[in-house]
Amino acid sequence: MAEKPILLGIDLGTTNTCVAYVRNKIAKVVPSDRGALILPSVVAMSEKGDLLVGNVAKDQMVVNPRNTIYGAKRLIGRKYHSKVVQDIKHYFSYEIVEGVDGECAVMLAGKVYSLPQISAFVLQHCKRVAEATLGHPIQEAVISVPAYYNDNQRTAVKEAGSLAGFKVRRIVNEPTAAALAYGLNRGFDHKVLVYDLGGGTFDVSVLQIHGNVMEVLATGGDTFLGGVDFDNRIIDHVLEEFRNETKIDLTQSPVAMQRIKNAAEAAKIDLSLLSNVVIELPYVADRRGKPVDLRIPLSRERLNTLVMDLVDRSFALVDQVMGEKNLSKAEIAEVLLVGGQTRMPLVQGKTHQHFGKPPRKGVHPDESVALGAALLAESMQEIDSVTLVDALSMPIGFAMPGGRFRKVIEKNTQIPAQRSFRLPQAKEGKMQDLDVFQGDSDKIVDNEYLGTLKFPPEASGQRVSFNLDEECLLHITVEGLSPDARPQEVMLATQDTPEALKAAWQEESERRQKAAESTPAERPKGILASIRKVFGSE
Ligand code: ADP
Ligand code: MG
């Protein structure tokens, strides 16, 4: 009998990537020469022009910062001119540029790479290691993404998978994967809360497990709260202590800063096991030609006070997410801790305190998402084995006059989902545009631009449906375009510069504001006029 093909489950993390597979119904992390296959999500080009992935890439980051790409997950599927990218691009040591279609791209050794290409290097590496260690060619994979990822980001991750040579069987939300790893085939019927504190992001989701049906009830978090913030608190503390002791300011020395950064993270990790460490960096500076060493003791207690507000913030978010669905703590049967930073005793202690019970034992913080993705991949080969019911993490809708956001599908709507509305009557023979956005704000300028729908004249007054498929990918159909009256799928067209579009909306909304305060003669035209045409009136 031919052996069953091996499918991989891949947790493509902001900081680390983990790869798992299933054999004889048991999910395991792919072993590699350095232990389990968990590798830094880092890609670099060496001086000699060699492509480096994982640990080797991370190790040379200090000496080759411009050609070392990390944190790609923050940029993938985002527009270069989007607010997020413009806000964060200065924090990266490599160059972020505008690629095709206004997408974010990066410079690596003088060449422009798309983010899916960068992530594909990581995935390809995983594929190669997995094939070598398992002794089989591997074609298919399930890849996990954060629950809050929008349509563009999901599509981009799928593209990365294909570029790496995988048939991507499915994109799965990370908390759902973690819940699967915990609850598949266990016959549970209860609610769990997944608290995922990784390197750069915090995600919280509540799921209802009913046998092998995993249903996301609510989801939320903070995309800028994670392990690096903990490291930064230690870095600030170390810099201050050193300055007090020596009057030397190390912030001006990039090499010293990088060494402190590495030492801070290492100290933080050690303090998850030990109650005291000493941060030691010989020859971190020199004074009048003499080396100055850094030696700063740090206790777990002190670390806890340095980061307490970060942990408190995460639990405020937990309460917020539960509050949105009126969920009480008593209803949560288990709390699953996911993400490397949850190894910190303070996080575990606070979880216990907050919920009145300890977090669930036996959930592996680094591996459970990959294990869950692998279990899903495996179960997809069987019929009716698992049902995943996801919830939409951010509303989807379109732009209205004044830059307002009209939601079509609300947050936390169960997916697959379909919502429809009627397109207004357009003037005879005119095309209509509808700009589609996703986000929590009532103003479209703060939300993510997904694309523009261009409707032919005959769509006027017809029913438009937004359909989210099981992978949370958006499909849009409109009735009345074909003679047999079957709904036709329409594609989102990407404008050249979505930000120019947003800027125009913004400008228009400001002008409107002004106009409302001034004479009718100064009332704006332009975009407003064309929108009025689409929606009938203001
Ligand atoms: P991501 O989901 O972003 O890829 P991970 O789940 O791999 O991230 O978490 C990485 C973070 O976990 C890093 O900030 C790392 O310092 C932190 N971390 C790893 N091990 C420990 C530990 N034992 N104690 C505290 N923090 C840890
Ligand atoms: Mg993670």
Image (spheres, rainbow, N blue to C red):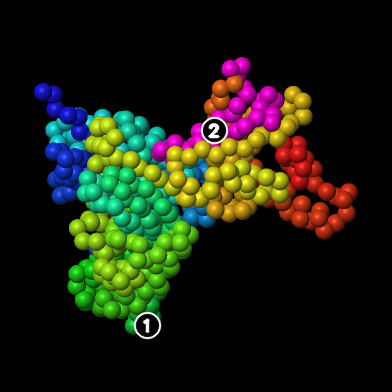
- Which residue is label 1 attached to? 244
Q: Residue furthest bottom?
A: 245
For image coordinates 31% across by 55% down, the residue present is 190
Residue 230, position as x, y percentages in the image: 35, 67
Sequence order check: which comes first, mark 1 or mark 2? Answer: 1
Q: Which residues are magenta?
A: 456-484
Badge 1 vs badge 2, beta-carbon distance below 8 Å:
no
In front of the other: 452 or 395: 395
Answer yes or no: is residue 315 visible: yes
Q: Is residue 308 left or right of residue 297?
A: right
43 drawn magenta: no
Dot 1 falls on a residue whose secondary structure is: helix
Q: Where's residue 467, x and y in %?
A: 50, 36
Q: Quadrant of the N terminus?
A: top left
- Describe residue 76's horizontal placement relative to residue 377 as left or right: right
Give the quarter of the image for residue 426: top right
* Alpha carbon distance from label 1 to label 2: 61 Å
Q: In the image, is 462 to the left or to the right of 78?
A: right
Q: Disc 2 designates what residue?
A: 476
In the depicted view, which residue is nearer to us: 513 or 475? Answer: 475
Q: Quadrant of residue 21?
A: top left
Q: Could one spot residue 263 in this view of the protein?
A: no
The residue tagged with tag 2: helix, strand or loop? strand
Instruction: From the top left corner, tell me how far across and down residue 33 is, in percent.
Output: 14, 45
Q: Observer-nearest residue: 26 or 304?
A: 26
Residue at point 22%, 45% (across, down): 185
Mark 2 Cα-neighbour bin, 10 Å: few <14, some 14–19, many ≥20: some
Which quadrant of the structure image shows residue 221? bottom left
Amino acid at the residue labelled 1: Asn
